[in-house]
Image (spheres, rainbow, N blue to C red):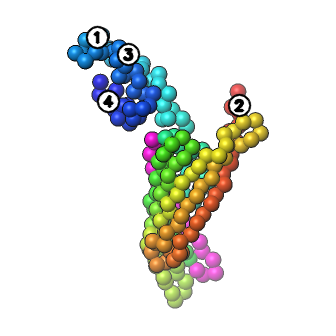
Amino acid sequence: VFAAFLVWLLAGSQNAYCEWFFEPTMFDRRGRGTPPTADDWGYTILAQDSPYDEPLETDRPDFTEASSVIPRGLLQIETGYTFSYDSEDNTRTRSHTAPESLFRYGIIDGLELRLVWNYAWQDVSSPGSYQADDGADDLLLGTKIALTSQEDLRPESAVILHLGTPTGGTAFTNQKTEFQLNYLWGYDLPNDT
């Protein structure tokens, strides 16, 4: 019963997950009927189509974005850490970025909302000088819209629209509102046997 409640809570009452659990023929208002066994609940939960069964395709910032959009009602949180080091002409630069957060939420099929936030630390040193900066990057708010699904030679495609807000730290902000547009496309290759 607890597992059924969790599925109902996560899926929403209009979703296919809930239809079997709350069919009027299963129980009447007085509780009459044959309650399902533990095996019935497990079979029903596993037999349903679930957005969680799909492969996870990430869009983590600063890496290649996928051309797929996450399903309706799903919240996907992606994070990471990047360290970079460069040493040229007696100048050493070290940078750290974290949490590289990307929050994706499926509003309807083919449309997701996105929020991107990051924090950076950087130090640059050369003989006789040292400079260290840290602060947030500008906050990005946006959406991803599915355009086409893959069919024959036509690729799966989507577009990402982002609005950059000048909310970052002094060393990392663009100091202006920016609009970004990314067109994404990709092919799933057939499985090798």
Query: Which residue shows up at 71% across the image and 33% down it?
Result: 190
Work out whether 48 lies above or below 76: above
- Viewer-nearest of labels 4 and 1? 1
Estimate the spatial distance between the alpha carbons at disc 1 and disc 3, rounded to whole Å.
Answer: 14 Å
Q: Which residue is mark 4?
A: 5
Of marks 1 and 2, which one's residue comes earlier in the chain? 1
Q: Which residue is mark 2?
A: 192
Estimate the spatial distance between the alpha carbons at disc 4 and disc 3, rounded to whole Å.
Answer: 15 Å
Magenta stretch, main secondary structure, is strand
Q: Report the front residue among 159 and 43.
A: 159
Amino acid type shown at disc 2: Asp
Amino acid type shown at disc 4: Phe
Q: Report the front residue among 171 and 22.
A: 22
Disc 2 crowd, CA 10 A, few/some/many (<14, 14-19, 20+): few
Q: Are marks 2 and 3 in contact (CB under 8 Å)?
A: no
Q: Which residue is mark 1?
A: 33
Of marks 1 and 3, which one's residue comes earlier in the chain? 1
Disc 3 crowd, CA 10 A, few/some/many (<14, 14-19, 20+): few
Of marks 4 and 3, which one's residue comes earlier in the chain? 4
| SS at badge 2 | loop
Q: Which residue is mark 3?
A: 40
Q: Which residues are magenta?
A: 73-91
Work out whether 175 lies above or below 116: below
